[in-house]
């Protein structure tokens, strides 16, 4: 972190006078005779010293008895690092709110509030964390002490004259991987890093945001995306086109297609699909059934035989017909069968799939080779998701694993671009264990232990273990995962550690000693800091310890040292919907919630597409929690479309039971906070 050059001493003084002016009684007008100034002065001195520690300043409203601490990153590029520092020193025990969607997020400050207006004028938007506590004063003092210790520790660290900046390509690869692994919060953090780092055009950033919104299933936000017509006009990658077409299907076509109401279908497509005509150019084979349905119906409305024939040929090649709405298929087939002049037939033939420009990369081995060579064709293949047309990587598992293990350091770094595509293609059903293990070795060798990397590493371990490896291979996998786990395990990453342990318990175990060693390595640091664990994490850690027979780990926490929130057992009656494609995870999360929140009725779903039963569950839910690893828009979009407007939707920051449980706790607490 560095002090921005425009933060002159005069500007800092102006900011401090405004911050401690109207609306803030923590140090009224910074009067030297104020009796309690010693509580605030240490934080002010850090700012005035000109160092590079995060800025922390208190706010107290004597009339409303409201207290908050504002932590300000000195640069947008430092937001993620600042969040990690805050969570390491003060979360989750002392932080009561703003732990939004799986991690600490910068607050949206109110420009009409004089104190927050002062922060906005001084530091700008989306760099400030607003931290509050429960009412008792001891929590406020604990938060204050923790943040002051954070600043002092940061100041005493060894000086560094440089900042390690990740290349844009690596950030994009980490974003894709986090998205594929279900790391919702991590993918958002990486988007913010990409925006702060520069080097990407606004259009390219928009493409990434649209892909993320599609994965989360928030179709309305996709169609309301700023400047969407301009983005479409610039011929975006196929993955982005597919995201927009998916959103049109969910918002405009799903219900009228279910009723087989062609007139309503046409009205919906005309009303919500104004950008669709420009999306009909190019090879549609990477589209899922929903996007393909939109293409068919758009061809019918536009009376475009060429587009209809191209889409129908793709559907036949991909064997998608059973997943396409019958009304769309019949109307498109009627159009495609219509006699047309020879000139039009010839043009249609030239635009058919066989006459499209050939795809330079046509298999997983070719993709890995192209990426290792740094070829732009490999990067383009990942961006366009052409791998969706290929057989599963499981068919080339031996070849891919051998290739990964034979790479130089530079080539191995480039291959990380493919890990997100690999996770999506493998899914839960067809593991490619040797390749997954090779990617694990890649992650360990390059020290990939950010929150998003951990979600990826857990997903890779899951793939490797689902194949029920022999004892020696099992031991090697666990040894690789455990090799540097002490570098990243901390209370703020408890859910990630618990996800690893949970997967180890669920998987077949040919080597009990190896499993026990890794589980102890993962759980022991959490046990030491158990008073800082969130309630859901603590409860699940106790369960795992009992299931694995690890009697040496203690989890009892005195009431006065534990988390400050009201226990989940006091939650009023409500209905919670859990969605994941991993049925075992759903079962364990539901069982745990029934223990710690007995008044909450928990329903689960693992549908790949929308169904009447899923619609009913979504409509009845008071809280919805989604795990997005391997999930497709067909299900997540369906759920969000049928959930009430005021119903909280939380996303697990990973694919394990602990991540889903933590998200459920977050969602339940949000309903209580919003009802007060």
Image (spheres, helix red, strand yellow):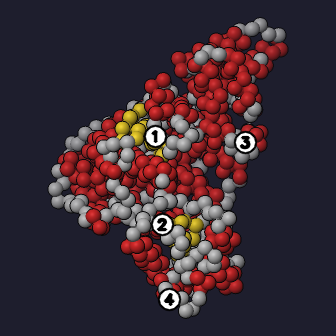
- Total tally of numbered discs in the picture: 4
- Is residue 602 found left or right of 452 in the rendered image? left
Q: What x and y, as percent, mark residue 503?
A: 31, 45
Secondary structure beneath disc 1? loop
Give how far apart the Cα atoms at labels 4 and 1 are.
Answer: 47 Å
The quadrant of the image that shows the N terminus is: bottom right
Closer mark to the observer between disc 2 and disc 4: 4
Q: Position of residue 124 (x, y in %)?
A: 66, 67
The residue at which mark 1 appears reads as 622
**Structural distance between the alpha carbons of marks 2 and 3:** 37 Å
Mark 4 vs 1, N-terminal side: 4
- Local crowd at mark 3 within 10 Å, few (<14), some, or many (≥20)? some
Q: Secondary structure at mark 2?
A: loop
Residue mark closest to the camera, 4 vs 1: 4
Q: Which residue is mark 3?
A: 228
Left or right: residue 216 compared with residue 384 = left
- Mark 1–mark 3 distance (CA, rounded to whole Å): 32 Å
Left/right of residue 545 with respect to residue 83 in the rendered view: left
Disc 4 versus disc 3: distance between alpha carbons? 56 Å
Residue that label 2 marks = 132
């Amino acid at each position: 972190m560095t002090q921005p050059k425009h933060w002159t001493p005069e500007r800092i003084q102006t900011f401090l006078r405004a911050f401690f002016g109207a609306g803030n009684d923590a140090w009224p007008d910074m009067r030297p005779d104020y009796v309690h100034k010693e509580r605030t002065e240490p934080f002010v001195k850090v700012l005035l010293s000109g160092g590079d520690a995060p800025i922390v300043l208190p706010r107290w409203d004597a009339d409303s008895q409201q207290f908050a601490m504002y932590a300000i990153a000195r640069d947008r590029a430092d937001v993620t690092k600042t969040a990690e520092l805050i969570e390491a020193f003060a979360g989750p025990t002392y932080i009561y709110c703003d732990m939004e969607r799986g991690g600490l997020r910068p607050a949206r400050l109110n420009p009409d509030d004089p104190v927050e207006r002062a922060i906005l004028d001084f530091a700008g938007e989306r760099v400030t964390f607003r931290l509050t506590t429960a009412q008792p004063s001891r929590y406020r003092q604990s938060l204050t002490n923790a943040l002051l210790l954070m600043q002092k520790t940061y100041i005493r660290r060894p000086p560094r004259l440089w900042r390690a900046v990740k290349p844009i390509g690596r950030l994009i690869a980490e974003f894709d991987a986090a998205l594929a692994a279900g790391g919702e919060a991590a993918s958002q953090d990486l988007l913010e890093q990409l925006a702060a780092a520069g080097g990407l055009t606004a259009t390219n950033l928009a493409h990434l945001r649209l892909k993320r919104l599609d994965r989360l299933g928030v179709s309305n936000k996709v169609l309301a995306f700023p400047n969407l017509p301009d983005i479409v006009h610039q011929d975006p990658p196929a993955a982005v086109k597919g995201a927009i077409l998916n959103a049109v299907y969910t918002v405009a076509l799903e219900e009228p297609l279910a009723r087989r109401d062609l007139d309503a279908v046409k009205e919906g497509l005309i009303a919500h699909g104004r950008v669709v005509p420009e999306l009909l150019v190019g090879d549609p084979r990477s589209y899922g059934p929903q996007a393909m349905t939109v293409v068919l119906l758009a061809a019918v409305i536009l009376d475009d035989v060429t587009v209809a024939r191209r889409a129908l040929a793709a559907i036949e090649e991909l064997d998608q017909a059973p997943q396409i709405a019958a009304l769309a298929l019949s109307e498109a087939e009627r159009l495609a069968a219509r006699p047309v002049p020879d000139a039009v037939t010839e043009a249609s033939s030239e635009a058919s799939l066989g006459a499209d420009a050939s795809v330079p990369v046509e298999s997983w081995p070719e993709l890995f080779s192209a990426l290792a060579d740094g070829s732009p064709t490999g990067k383009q293949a990942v961006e366009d998701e052409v791998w969706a047309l290929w057989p599963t990587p499981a068919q080339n598992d031996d070849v891919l694993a051998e290739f990964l293990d034979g790479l130089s350091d530079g080539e191995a770094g480039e291959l990380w671009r493919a890990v997100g595509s690999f996770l999506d293609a493998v899914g839960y059903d067809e593991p490619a264990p040797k390749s997954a293990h090779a990617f694990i070795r890649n992650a360990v060798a390059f020290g990939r232990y950010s929150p998003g990397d951990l979600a990826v590493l857990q997903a890779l371990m899951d793939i490797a273990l689902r194949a029920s490896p022999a004892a020696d291979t099992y031991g090697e996998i666990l040894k690789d995962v455990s090799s540097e786990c002490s570098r990243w395990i901390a209370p703020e990453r408890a859910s990630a550690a618990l996800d690893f342990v949970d997967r180890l318990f669920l998987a077949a175990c040919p080597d009990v000693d190896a499993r026990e060693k890794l589980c102890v390595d993962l759980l022991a640091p959490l046990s030491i800091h158990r008073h800082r664990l969130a309630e859901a994490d603590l409860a699940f850690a106790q369960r795992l310890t009992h299931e694995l027979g690890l009697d040496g780990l203690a989890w009892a926490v005195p009431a006065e040292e534990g988390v400050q929130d009201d226990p989940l057992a006091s939650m009023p009656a409500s209905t919670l919907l859990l969605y994941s494609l991993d049925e075992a995870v759903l079962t364990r999360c539901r069982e745990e919630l029934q223990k710690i929140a007995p008044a909450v009725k928990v329903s689960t779903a693992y549908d790949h597409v929308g169904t009447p039963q899923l619609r009913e569950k979504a409509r009845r839910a008071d809280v919805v929690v989604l795990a997005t690893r391997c999930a497709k828009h067909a299900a997540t979009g369906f759920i969000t479309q049928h959930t009430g407007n005021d119903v909280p939707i939380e996303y697990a920051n990973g694919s394990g039971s602990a991540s889903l449980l933590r998200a459920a706790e977050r969602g339940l607490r949000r309903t209580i906070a919003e009802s007060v």
